[in-house]
Image (tube, coloured by chain):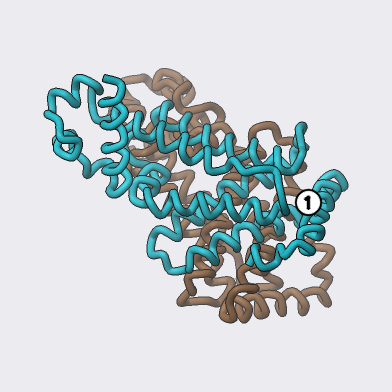
Chain colours: A brown, B cyan
Amino acid sequence: MEERRQQLIGVALELFSSRSPDEVSIDEIATAAGISRPLVYHYFPGKLSLYEAALKRAAEDLADRFVEPREGPLGARLLRVMRRYFDFVDDHGPGFSALLRGGPGVGSSRTNTLIDGVRQAAYVQILTHLDVTNPPARLELVVRSWISLVESAALIWLEGRRIPREELETKLVHDFASLMTVSAAYDKEMAAILRRMVSDETIADDQGYASNFR
Amino acid sequence: MEERRQQLIGVALELFSSRSPDEVSIDEIATAAGISRPLVYHYFPGKLSLYEAALKRAAEDLADRFVEPREGPLGARLLRVMRRYFDFVDDHGPGFSALLRGGPGVGSSRTNTLIDGVRQAAYVQILTHLDVTNPPARLELVVRSWISLVESAALIWLEGRRIPREELETKLVHDFASLMTVSAAYDKEMAAILRRMVSDETIADDQGYASNFR
């Protein structure tokens, strides 16, 4: 039973990822899963509930992509995260756009909670890597607004993929460093965090960091 | 008739701005406008339609704040825009947050169209000031993702106003310059646009720009 339910979520996620959720019907999900329409309704009361289950799985997957071993230079860690993030964006393009641009169920408190959960997971991971437990307001602002920047860059990229994906991934890592640098110009605490961040990069340079990073 | 309708929209906008739209009732709007509840319904079929009318007025107001004479250094122009933008955010805080975080009517195609209209107006204004008519993909990415950065910074700022507003306004102008600079590192066309942007700043320095800008 649970296995069949999980399989159904997987099939639904694939369909919801490849087109806007509006355009996917329960009939189509049933056909793709090789089961009858009534059996779909046995597991889920309606399309919204199946959509939310698929979204929950996608959100967990996306949040996991921000988890990275605390080893090596910070820039290279963040670049690996960006690669995994854009793998996801690439695989789930239409669904990702529909969700973040406001599709069905958006504005419902449950979908918003899932989206916020991913953002929060990303935020917590970045703080962990920066070795900060009590983030000052300026750091919170930089990290959280950079996460928005990444989301919007992904949405714009999906519109026509007019920029090479690898360039965009690297650019977003550099954007993070540059937003940190601007903030450090206003505040000693931010300057100290930035110095620690950059000192890691210097050590890394001796380990062939430049070639990994570019 | 039209005057009464406009006055009603103004009253509704004030109420929708000061609290989450969920928390504002038609009765309260009627009382604040000094008219009867049936008369509100004479002008608007329901709360959503009144909310959308208020939102439309707010969107026009916000879009207008990006209009700036094409005179003087670009950084100072953008800083004046940020000041007006944050005046708006300051005045409409709870409504601004509720709308962009997903409140009632969000996900409806009409409210999304209004929000997108403001973003598009901001984008077009910035291109005009950069003297660019056919934006390359990388410029589109920087400008549009910076607009998202500003929105998210405003939302984060509203949570607790833990950073001085003036500092944040200046920081966002510097963020724009720094995101442009990162992008220029990847692309000759972006480097040329950046050089033109920066050359304006140099001229401006002689005109006492530094004191305006900080």
Residue most toward the front?
B207
Q: Residue A11 location in percent, x, y?
A: 48, 32
Q: Residue A51 location in percent, x, y?
A: 40, 34
Please name the residue shown 54% across and 27% down the image: A19
B163 in relation to B25, above or below? below
Is A61 displayed left or right of B101 in the figure?
Answer: right
Q: Are there few (<14), some (14-19), or many (20+) residues within 10 Å of tag 1?
A: some
Chain of the residue under the numbered disc 1 shown in the image:
B
Please name the residue shown 40% across and 58% down the image: B158
Q: For the residue labelled by badge 1, is the local secondary structure a helix, a strand or a loop?
A: helix
Q: Quadrant of residue B36?
A: top left
A114 in relation to B137, above or below? below
Q: Quadrant of the N terminus of chain A?
A: top left
Q: Quadrant of the C terminus of chain A?
A: bottom right
Viewer-closest of A209 and A180: A180
Is A104 displayed left or right of B7 in the figure?
Answer: right
Circle 1 residue: B197
B183 in relation to B62, above or below? below
Q: Residue B186 location in percent, x, y?
A: 82, 51
Please name the residue shown 13% across and 23% down the image: B38
Is residue A54 in view from this perspective?
A: yes
Please name the residue shown 30% across and 43% down the image: B14
How many discs appear?
1
Is B8 displayed left or right of B148 in the figure?
Answer: left
